[in-house]
Amino acid sequence: MTKLIKPSAINGKISAPASKSMMQRAIAIATLAHGTSKLIGYTANEDSEAALEIAHKLGAMVSLENNIVEITGGRTPINYSLHCGEAGLGIRMFTPIASLYNKTFLLDGAGSLRKRPIAMLEKPLQELGVTVKSTGGFIPIEVTGPIIGGQATVDGSLSSQMLTGLLIALPLAQKDTLLNVIDLKSKPYIDMTIQIMADFGVCVEHTNYETFSIKANQKYNPQTYTIEGDWSGAAFLLVAGALGGEVEVGNLRTNSKQADIAILDAIRQAGATVTISENSVKIKKNLLKAYSFDATECPDLFPPLVALAAHCEGISKIKGIERLKHKESDRATVLKTEFAKLGTKITLEGDTMFIHGGTLKGGMLHANNDHRIAMAGACAAILAQTDVIIENPECIAKSYPGFYDDFEKISSLK
């Protein structure tokens, strides 16, 4: 399957989809709360659908009508085999949550998730009283609880997602817990986790993201909760505006703790005009120039940043490629290979990517089953000399199934 994207002008208003990161966290917490929560603003995607199926297996009553998910949680699990699809957050978050129960659970997934390491889960869970058995540091992984609490050391150098799972689970443990966290990356994602936990009535304290103190025997309170818009998906729409003309993206919380709100800094550096309103952002194209950006804390921004840099005069520098090895693809290598097919030279040196801008011609790009690579290809086409053809375009369903429809709403042929 392929998708043809023609060079285009960009103009219009569009709403960002709901944040799948916040939605997955909200589903997990609502599953643990005793009572009925309403999650407003649901946008369908494969990762969130996998989380809802896990909630059901953990005993929650789940219903979906229009864009409202109703979850009645705090119930007894009905199935001990949990499938996370290709959701990295899903496997690393629900493994500690499954460890709350005095049962044995088998957690598995599909596709690229089978190549993403989870060894960092094993030692801290064992230290907290859980019996753990992975498949050589990969899924499937088997856990037998209950998680007791106490003291554990967490390696945060590859991902913050396991810490998110522990933080969500441990307030329901038998004993208070002190987590010592080493080399934590993506701190804004932990801010998101702590925020949504607090919104559901549970408190976590930390010192400089190095030690986390979690009181035991807390309770999540069911809530009516609106899921904020997704800065990760919106980043592609905002870059489209910076490349092609003008766009206003709504349903964005402009004081959000989401890491990918940092896309605004890169767009400003590249020369576009950024206008922030209460719940929306307007981007207007100006003369584009090369920029430097540190994406260590927001690695999901690499694909839209590369699409932007490909059309900026000069050599742009993006730091943080060490964070890209275990995504849906080896993103640094895939971006280098696939953008070369379009005429843009990318070099990788240490932890930094150099994008030689102003050279993108067009051609065929393979998404490598990576939703963000596919969306980056569409953005790259805006100022291309010829069409861009995206192979494997359907992989956007993982996070943003409506992306091509939204893209077409704001684009018009030159």
Image (cartoon, grey):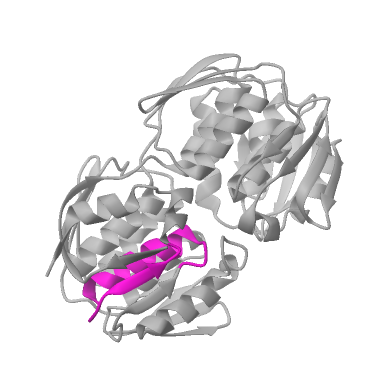
Q: Residue furthest toward the left?
A: 414
Nearest to the observer: residue 395 or residue 356? 395
Viewer-side residue, 180 vs 132: 132
165 in relation to 64, above or below:
below
**Residue 308 in which image quadrant:** bottom left
The image shows residue 11 at horizontal and vertical percentages of 14, 57
Q: In percent of the image, x 61 and y 14: which residue is there?
A: 34
Q: Residue at x 27, y 84 (%)?
A: 358
Q: Residue 90: give x, y in percent of width and height.
A: 61, 43
Q: Residue at x 55, y 17 (%)?
A: 221
Left/right of residue 283 with respect to residue 346 in the rendered view: left
Q: Residue furthest top?
A: 35
Instruction: From this view, report whether residue 54 is shown above or below residue 386.
Output: above
Residue 190 figure quarter: top right
Q: Quadrant of the C terminus?
A: bottom left
Percent x, y of residue 201: 54, 22
Tally the marks.
0
User: Which quadrant is the N terminus positioned in?
Assistant: bottom left
Specify the quadrant of the image occupied by residue 127: top right
Of 93 and 365, nearer the camera is 365
The percent coordinates of residue 369 (x first, y second) are 52, 62
Q: Judge left or right: residue 197 versus residue 301.
A: right
Tell me if residue 384 is in the magenta stretch.
yes
* Any part of residue 194 in sight: no
Whether residue 273 appears in this view of the structure is yes
Q: Is residue 409 above or below residue 204?
A: below
Would residue 288 be found to the left or right of residue 321 on screen?
left
Q: Is residue 346 found inside the magenta-colored segment of the image?
A: no
Residue extent of the magenta highlight: 367-392
